[in-house]
Amino acid sequence: MADQWLKTCKEYLSYVRRPFQSIPVRQLWKSHQSNWADAFQEWSVLQFYMGAVTAVVMGVIGTLDGHSVISVSIEVVIRIIFAYVLAHLSWFAVVRKKGCFCVLFACCQCPFVLLLWGVLSMLWGVFGMVASVKDLWHCVFCIAAPCVQATYSTILIYMGLCCFKLWIEHGSEIIPPVVEMQGPRAEIVGVAQTV
């Protein structure tokens, strides 16, 4: 699965370089979309950009707060890398695989995972909103951080909405009628062997 994800880097980077090709930004904010997968794709690109902006804003605030420029710079770079990986990974799981969730060495791929991605994204967005309100009056020049966090959280909520709509398009299935499991062929223990 990791190999498949890595092979989509060039494709996803083309969306990052040229956003809003499939859906204009004004249409993206509407609650009705002609193609929810395209909407999710555009929101994931926005998630990356807003993650990068958030990293830079937090870096500036950290520097103004007296932290080392080198450590702040390293943190900004790491945050931007994580923003890209998370945006690309969510796009791959939701749009390319139509519902995929990997944990360690196991991957679950089914429409229900779209609902899971949607719920997690919306919850993360709501938690981010709460955190941004909590930090609103932390300091005078820190007002930028909660504003950026609130914008980022709004993007996550819209991504969750897209996942929910995609799950509905796939039949709102929680448990598929047939579950297929594949694994390595097993040897039967205790069977007589011929020589």
Image (spheres, rainbow, N blue to C red):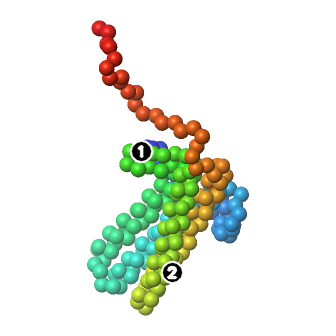
Given residues 180 and 160, the one toward you in this image is 180
Q: Residue at label 1?
A: 106
Q: Which amino acid does label 2 sit on?
A: Cys
Q: Tag 1 or tag 2, which sits nearer the N-term?
A: 1
Q: Residue at x 51, y 49 (%)?
A: 100
Tell me how many marks there are. 2
Q: Helix, strand or loop at disc 1?
A: strand
Query: Which residue is farthest front?
Result: 190
- Residue 193, position in %: x, y? 31, 13
Label at residue 143 = none
The residue identified by callout 2 is: 147
x, y percentage for residue 126? 52, 72
The crowd level at tag 2 (other Cα within 10 Å; few <14, some 14-19, many 20+) is: some
As drawn, the residue found furthest toward the top would be 195
The quarter in which the C terminus is drawn is top left
The answer to whether any part of residue 15 appears in the image is no
Instruction: Say if 178 sits above or below 73 in the image.
Output: above
Report the quarter where the N terminus lies.
top left
Outermost residue, bottom side: 140
Element type at mark 2: helix
Q: What amino acid does circle 1 point to?
A: Ala
> Could you say where residue 79 lies in the image, as x and y percent from the top left?
39, 67
- Is label 2 in contact with label 1 (beta carbons under 8 Å)? no
Q: Which residue is drawn at 54% across and 66% down?
A: 122
x, y percent for residue 14: 55, 55
Residue at (36%, 23%) from the top-left corner? 188
Mark 2 vs mark 1: in front: 1
Q: Reply above or below: 7 against 15.
A: above
Tell which of 98 and 13 is nearer to you: 98
